[in-house]
Amino acid sequence: MSRSTHPPHDPSPRRSSPAADALLVAGWLASVAAVLALPNLTHSPDVGDDRTRDTVRLALVYYGLAASLMPWLAGEDWAARTGRGRLARWCWTFGWATYLVHVLLAFHYQHHWSHAEAVRHTEAVSGFGPGIYASHLFTVLWTADVAWWWLAAARYARRPAWVGWLWHGYLLFVIFNATVVYEAGLIRWAGVALLGWLLAGRLLAWRRWGQVSDLHVGSGSPDPPPAAAADAEGKIVRSESGC
């Protein structure tokens, strides 16, 4: 197995580039605008349904980008002190924000702002109406996770490993059901491909670093001895991946 040449992280914080951040936000706004405009441009017979479905698909694209970066993040990346870490955080944020747009569109077009109608729809689709509360929990948890990463990045980087495993396991369970169980055709296969891609990325990261890294190795994770740290300059010394 070849050794990674990933350089050690500079512990000093690095300023983010306002221009780069603005460009990323502009790109996200443009992608959302394109998804919302596409049904009109293609003369869709059901604009509302297309917008609702396409926004959640765009959310999954951003989620996939973020989750693809997460296995390669180390401590300083998770603290948003590097360009790679900030990019992952932006993709994570865009996925969450696009998902919120999807939820609003679903309640507008599908449920007509009636929670009772949303419960009936969930009952018709899954056979279990109260299952909608799992979606509500999903929304609350993702919102809290994004807020935590932005408001307290250093503490976010040190959170216990089990928190990351539990959260991302739940997230993948929701995505699996939404794309594989309750969908068909192209969307189902796209969901399978996404999950396979993320699994392959995780395994590749494990092989590259030469160790199994936790989702977030917290402050309780022991540091390697000096000799091991010197030998592992090309490896991740204290991996804190979040996917």
Image (tube, grey):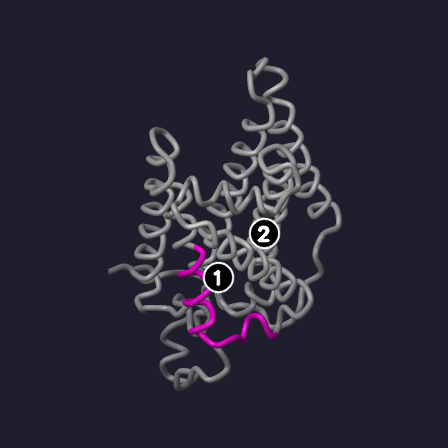
> What is the secondary structure assignment of the residue under circle 2?
helix
Occupied quadrant, residue 41? top right
> What is the secondary structure assignment of the residue under circle 1?
loop
Q: Position of residue 25 (x, y in %)?
A: 69, 43
44 or 4, which is in the foreground? 44
Q: Position of residue 179 (x, y in %)?
A: 39, 41
User: In the rendered structure, does residue 161 fall within the stretch colored magenta?
Assistant: yes
Of labels 1 and 2, earlier in sequence is 1
Q: Callout 2: 10 Å neighbours few (<14), some, many (20+)? A: some
Q: Which residue is mark 1?
A: 73
The relative height of residue 221 versus residue 98 in the rendered view (above or below) is below
The relative height of residue 185 versus residue 99 in the rendered view (above or below) is above
**Residue that protrudes farthest toward the left in the picture:** 1
Query: In percent of the image, x 39 and y 70: which residue is there?
Result: 214
Is the C terminus in the top left, top right, bottom left or bottom right quadrant? bottom left
User: In the rendered structure, does residue 126 fall within the stretch colored magenta?
Assistant: no
Occupied quadrant, residue 34? top right
| Disc 1 and disc 2 in contact, CB within 8 angstroms | no
Q: Which residue is mark 2?
A: 87
On the picture, is 47 further left or further right than 72?
Answer: right
- In three-dimensional space, the C-alpha distance between marks 1 and 2, rounded to whole angstroms, equals 11 Å
Could you tell me what secondary structure mostly forms the magenta stretch? helix
Magenta segment: 155-171
On the picture, is 107 further left or further right than 66?
Answer: right
Q: At label 2, which amino acid type do we have?
A: Leu
What's the mark number on residue 29?
none
On the picture, is 175 further left or further right than 93?
Answer: left
Q: Callout 1: 10 Å neighbours few (<14), some, many (20+)? A: many
Is the N terminus in the top left, top right, bottom left or bottom right quadrant? bottom left
